[in-house]
Amino acid sequence: MPSIFVLGVSGYIGGSILVGYKKAYPDYDYVALVRSESSIPAVEALGIRVVKGSHSDHRLITEESSKADIILNAADADDLELTKAVLAGVKQTTIGKIPILIHTSGTGLATKDGSGKWDPNYKIRNDNNVDDIRSIPPEAPHRNVDLEIFEADSAGYVSAYIIAPSTIYGTGTGPGNRISQQVPTLTNEILSHKQTVFVGEGTNQWNNVHIDDLVDLYIIVTNLAIAELGPAAKVDSYNKFFWGSVGKHSWGDVARKIGKILHSQGIIDKVEPKSIPFRPELGAIASNSITIPDRGLKNGWEPKGVPLEDTLEETVQQVVAASKQK
């Protein structure tokens, strides 16, 4: 049977995709790279063969990539050396056909720092417009890795598809971390101030996507990749790029809702919002990132997850519980 090599299986995104893959492709053989000894039993319980190693074990990653029909990289959108190790493996594939790479990037590609303010001159990029994707600046976050993948796909030794999610929300389903990143970052910032806070004016905007909808998109894209390895003409590399973006929020509005939840439970002192200055570690919650996911929608993606706002209370409780364990 075809085999899938998974990177990032213990993470929020990778673990959830793996569970979705197991339902969509139950007869495939699965191999996953796992860094932590303590994470191995939960991964193996899903019927996955584990190879123990870190993202810096490039020789091991190259070896496993050379044997896989499909490689899912949901490990690190900015680890260029990891990606080079994967590409080195597919270049010397032993499966007798072109392997598929499903790579996780992010809408950080489309960020513009407004330091907490919406920029009326912001350029909104549509993934169904090749020029919009080709013209992303080389210095954009994740872009150096994506360009390496586009080049490999154009060279013809791998069929590479890139999915770039926006703010992901909802509880994951994987064997490891099930909590998202950006909403918890803002929640922890509010907890540290004991007051509702946002950066600048709080008018900066991002798209968002429910984790279950994102998993659906990965399966749609993977099905496309499998189908397009047949007799169909080669697909242009930049036509194999998908934004994972659905809803839209301003970070100020999200902060106010989180503040109300925490204040109602007596966890923070003040519900009135306070503006704080930008710090690099605040990352996405200070910038703008709005994209149009036409390519996924045109290929049958039908997002149906509840809105981000409806998941905030659950996420906040998860963050509060985690903070008490530290």
Image (tube, rainbow, N blue to C red):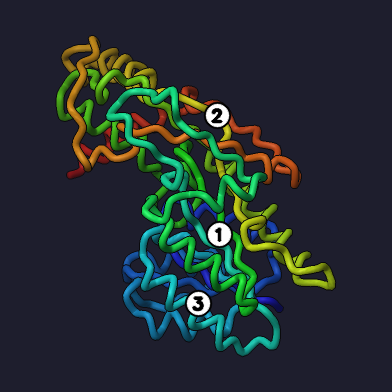
Query: Any mark on residue 87, and which?
Result: 3
Q: Which residue is label 2 attached to?
A: 247
Is residue 176 among what the camera can see? no
| Three-letter residue code for mark 2 | Gly
Residue 187 shown left or right of residue 8 in the figure: left
Residue 290 drawn at (x, y percent)? 49, 33
Nearer the observer: mark 3 or 2; the answer is 3
Q: Residue at x 22, y 41 (%)?
A: 280
**Which quadrant is home to the N terminus?**
bottom right
Q: Is residue 115 above or below residue 296?
A: above
Q: Rounded to the nearest whole Å, what is the CA distance between mark 3 and mark 1?
A: 21 Å
- In depth, the one of 214 and 265 nearer the eye is 214
**Which quadrant is home to the C terminus?**
top left
Residue 263 drawn at (x, y percent)? 25, 15
Q: Rounded to the nearest whole Å, what is the CA distance between mark 3 and mark 2?
A: 33 Å
Residue 254 shown left or right of residue 1 in the figure: left
| Three-letter residue code for mark 3 | Leu
Element under disc 1: helix
Q: Which residue is label 1 attached to?
A: 18
Q: Earlier in the sequence, mark 2 or mark 1?
A: 1
